[in-house]
Image: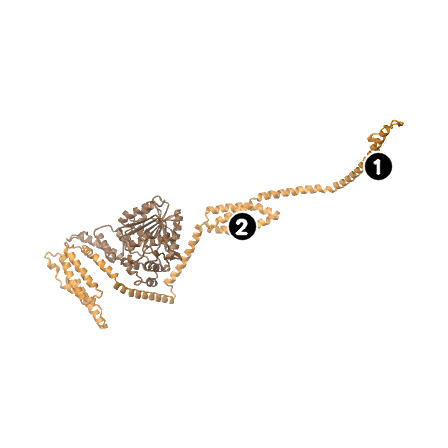
Chain colours: A brown, B orange
């Protein structure tokens, strides 16, 4: 409940209130500033805009199997390493895991023709080589978030054998049956939306446009509720660090390469080809039943970007003996950051990995 | 605003707003009438609202203490605003029905707020209470609206026209800049694509190295190579000397030259490319071939010794003709000796025959025993026969 200010006039109260309003107005006008992605890291490989980070361990490496995190093509990956004390990457590193992350960078005009073939068949396999070489390991764990999870699943289906040891899918959409997608399902319907129009006009789809699309799924919460929360925290003198970091991330979208966007909307959303086994990358069929490694599939009940049915279907499609579907009462991002994530997801992830990383 | 005070004179912002609104609305109305087009006059709504606010009773007069009662303010604002919106909605100024829904939401919200506890005087707290009260309904309304077929029907042509305009505009920009000989974004992008292709090639080479086709030359490997080359060179020095003497060495020298010619560029390449393994193997082969060389050299030396010995033999053989002449003389003597021996054998046989006759004669008793001639010794006989032979010659 908001703290009620004194109704009586006093200079101190007025100045204090003005100061708070100034803080809020500054955020609204200048945008949120926060130091994100602070876990020490080094770039061990780069290609085009993509960079492969290796997070510097501050404790002795306890597990020989490294973890490679694949992030989505939209938004920035530092949500996995949001801020000290609220970072999945930092947690894993401190548990003795050797953590790597592939950051796709910010695509530019020259990248408008990049497709999932490039990402799944060129970038990811090469990143895997670099990880194995750098860590002197023979196997690795692949952890994909959101669209990065979809790409990770495709990689696992195309390269099911060694060196892939474990697969972790974090809120990864696999089934795009429109009825399960809420507002997305309505908007993405072929009769309502032609992705070619945007891709041909923009080249790369601007990050702001993608963000708008995502926010419009919950417009009041995203456009109004966020700022109500901001004022509430400011006026109650609560810590703004997490809010600032999250708001910075939400407003820090990257363009979506046009060709990949067309594929994503057309073949995944509108034609739902992945579930049907009809996705072909350079002539190679993506058959999810070829996945046989241990799989941890994680989804959030309140996730409206990757709904539960979208992720759950994976359990039926893969052929792994060792597989688990872990559901949390969280949204798309709350799954990996915040107090609930710390309490629920992170320890579970650690325990699951610990048993499979020796 | 100072407590209990009210803006005075021309500094009153409400009065200024009203003045500005009147002026602007008039200007817009004139323009719209001139064009004979029917547009919703938003300024009319705004003007009505301002008018109602201006006509509202002074809140300070309602409270003898001069304090603002938030509930009263809310009610005043709500009554003056909602009335105008309702009029607008009823007069057909709400084609999508949004205003009607909005009014319903506002009335629900008013009922919720006014039935609750006393409203906070803090502006934000008041707003938050309002937001909490209506956010769910509001969210549902917005989501229903943007997910409705009507909304999507409106969006389709908008999206099509917007993207068509954007594409046309961008193409025109490109063409214009091109006509001015100015590089465009797509030109820069093309250059960037070339750089990315180059990166891809470098990555492929990198992969080839990692796959073990080659290794990066390290300082240590180069030093080892240098040392081994030194060893090879030291072995090549005596080899060239021997080759001058022996024709067979020429072939080896040629091959070594080929090896050297191959090694020269290889060592340079090895610094960058590091194809050490192949060179190492080839050097090993060269070494293997060079290893028997000392033995060959020894053999060569032994051949030289043989030559010397042959010379000695030859020198000895030079004396052979004289010896052979003597030998042929000996042979002749031998033959003559053989002849003498055969003659002597014949003499001996004759003598034995004679002896046998003599002994036979002496063995006859009846007859007068002839006087026995003294027997000659063999040596006497031999001398005699030899003499006779000599005499015969």
Task: For label 2, count other residues whose C-alpha is less than 10 Å away and answer few (under 14), some (14-19) or many (20+).
Answer: some
Which residue is farthest right? B368
Residue B390 tag number: 1
Q: For this view, does B170 lie left or right of residue B322?
A: left
Query: What is the secondary structure assignment of the residue under circle 1?
Result: helix
Query: What is the secondary structure assignment of the residue under circle 2?
Result: helix
Classify B173 as above or below A154: below
Task: For label 1, count other residues whose C-alpha is less than 10 Å away and answer few (under 14), some (14-19) or many (20+).
Answer: few
> Nearer the observer, disc 2 or disc 1?
1
- Quarter of the rendering occupied by the C terminus of chain B: top right
Q: Where in the figure is residue A310, as x and y percent of width and height?
A: 30, 55
Residue with the mark numbered 2 = B260
**Residue toward you, B145 or B369:** B369
Q: Quadrant of residue B9?
A: bottom left
Per the model, the C-alpha gap separating discs 2 and 1 is: 85 Å
Q: Where in the figure is residue B365, as x and y percent of width and height?
A: 87, 26
Q: Is residue A156 visible?
A: no
Q: For this view, does A157 lie left or right of residue B229?
A: left
**Residue toward you, A134 or A298:** A298
Q: Is residue B327 visible?
A: yes
Q: Where in the figure is residue A358, as x and y percent of width and height?
A: 36, 44
Q: Where in the figure is residue A66, as x and y percent of width and height?
A: 36, 47
**Residue toward you, A346 or A54:** A346
How many discs appear?
2
Q: Quadrant of residue A258?
A: bottom left
Q: Quadrant of residue B13?
A: bottom left
**Subunit bearing disc 2:** B
């Amino acid at each position: 409940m908001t703290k009620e200010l004194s109704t009586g006039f006093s200079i101190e109260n007025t100045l204090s209130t003005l100061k708070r309003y100034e803080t809020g107005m500054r955020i609204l006008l200048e945008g949120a500033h926060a130091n994100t992605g602070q876990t020490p890291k080094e770039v061990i490989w780069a290609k085009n805009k993509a960079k492969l980070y290796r997070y510097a361990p501050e404790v002795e490496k306890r597990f020989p199997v490294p973890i490679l995190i694949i992030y989505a093509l939209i938004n920035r990956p530092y949500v996995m390493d949001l801020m000290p004390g609220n970072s999945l990457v930092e947690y894993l590193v401190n548990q003795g895991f050797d953590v790597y992350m592939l950051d796709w960078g910010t695509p530019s005009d020259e990248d408008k023709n990049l497709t999932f073939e490039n990402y799944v068949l060129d970038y990811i396999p090469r990143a895997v080589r670099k990880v194995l070489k750098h860590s002197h390991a023979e196997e690795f764990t692949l952890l994909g978030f959101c669209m990065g999870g979809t790409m990770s699943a495709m990689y696992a289906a195309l390269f099911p054998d060694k060196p892939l040891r474990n697969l972790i899918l974090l809120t990864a959409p696999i089934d795009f049956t429109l009825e399960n997608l809420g507002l997305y399902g309505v908007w993405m319907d072929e009769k309502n939306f032609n992705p070619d129009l945007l891709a041909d006009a923009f080249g790369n789809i601007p990050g702001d446009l993608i963000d708008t699309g995502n926010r419009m799924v919950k417009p009041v919460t995203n456009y109004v509720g966020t700022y109500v929360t901001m004022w509430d925290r400011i006026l109650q003198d609560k810590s703004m660090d997490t809010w600032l970091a999250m708001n910075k991330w939400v407003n820090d979208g990257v363009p979506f390469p046009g060709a990949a966007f067309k594929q994503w909307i057309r073949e995944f959303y509108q034609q739902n080809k992945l579930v049907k086994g009809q996705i072909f990358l350079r002539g190679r069929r993506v058959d999810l039943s070829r996945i046989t490694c241990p799989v941890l599939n994680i989804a959030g009940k309140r996730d409206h970007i990757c709904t539960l049915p979208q992720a759950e279907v994976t359990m039926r499609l893969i052929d792994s003996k060792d597989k688990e579907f872990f559901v949390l009462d969280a949204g798309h991002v709350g799954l990996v950051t915040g107090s609930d994530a710390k309490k629920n997801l992170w320890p579970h992830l650690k325990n699951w990995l610990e048993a499979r990383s020796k | 605003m100072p407590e209990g005070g009210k803006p005075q004179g021309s500094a009153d912002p409400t009065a200024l707003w009203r003045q500005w609104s009147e002026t602007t609305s008039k200007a817009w109305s004139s323009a719209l009438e001139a064009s004979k087009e029917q547009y919703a006059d938003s300024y009319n709504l705004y003007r009505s609202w301002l008018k109602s606010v201006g006509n509202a009773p002074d809140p300070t007069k309602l409270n003898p203490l001069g304090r603002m009662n938030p509930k009263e303010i809310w009610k005043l604002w709500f009554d003056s605003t909602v009335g105008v919106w309702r009029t607008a909605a009823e007069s057909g100024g709400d084609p999508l029905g949004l205003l009607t829904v909005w009014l319903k939401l506002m009335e629900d919200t008013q009922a919720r707020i006014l039935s609750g506890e006393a409203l906070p005087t803090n502006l934000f707290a008041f707003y938050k209470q309002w937001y909490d009260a209506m956010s769910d309904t509001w969210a549902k309304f917005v989501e229903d609206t943007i997910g409705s077929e009507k909304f999507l029907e409106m969006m389709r042509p908008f999206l099509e026209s917007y993207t068509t305009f954007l594409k046309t505009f961008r193409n025109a920009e490109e063409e214009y800049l091109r006509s001015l000989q100015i590089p465009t974004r797509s030109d820069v992008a093309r250059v960037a694509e070339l750089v990315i292709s180059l990166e891809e090639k470098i990555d492929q080479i990198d992969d080839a190295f990692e796959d073990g086709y080659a290794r990066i030359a390290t300082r240590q490997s180069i030093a080892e190579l240098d040392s081994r080359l030194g060893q090879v060179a030291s072995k090549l020095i005596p080899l060239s000397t021997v080759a001058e003497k022996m024709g067979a060495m020429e072939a080896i020298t040629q091959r070594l030259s080929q090896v050297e010619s191959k090694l020269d560029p290889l060592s340079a390449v090895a610094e960058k490319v590091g194809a050490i393994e192949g060179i190492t193997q080839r050097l090993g082969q060269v070494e293997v071939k060079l290893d028997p060389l000392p033995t060959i050299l020894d053999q060569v030396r032994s051949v030289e010794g043989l030559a010397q010995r042959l010379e000695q033999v030859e020198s000895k053989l030079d004396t052979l003709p004289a010896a052979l002449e003597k030998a042929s003389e000996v042979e002749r003597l031998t033959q003559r000796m053989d002849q003498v021996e055969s003659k002597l054998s014949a003499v001996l046989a004759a003598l034995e025959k004679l002896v046998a006759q003599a002994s036979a004669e002496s063995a006859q008793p009846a007859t007068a025993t002839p006087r026995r001639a003294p027997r000659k010794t063999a040596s006497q006989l031999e001398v005699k026969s030899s003499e006779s032979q000599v005499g015969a010659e």
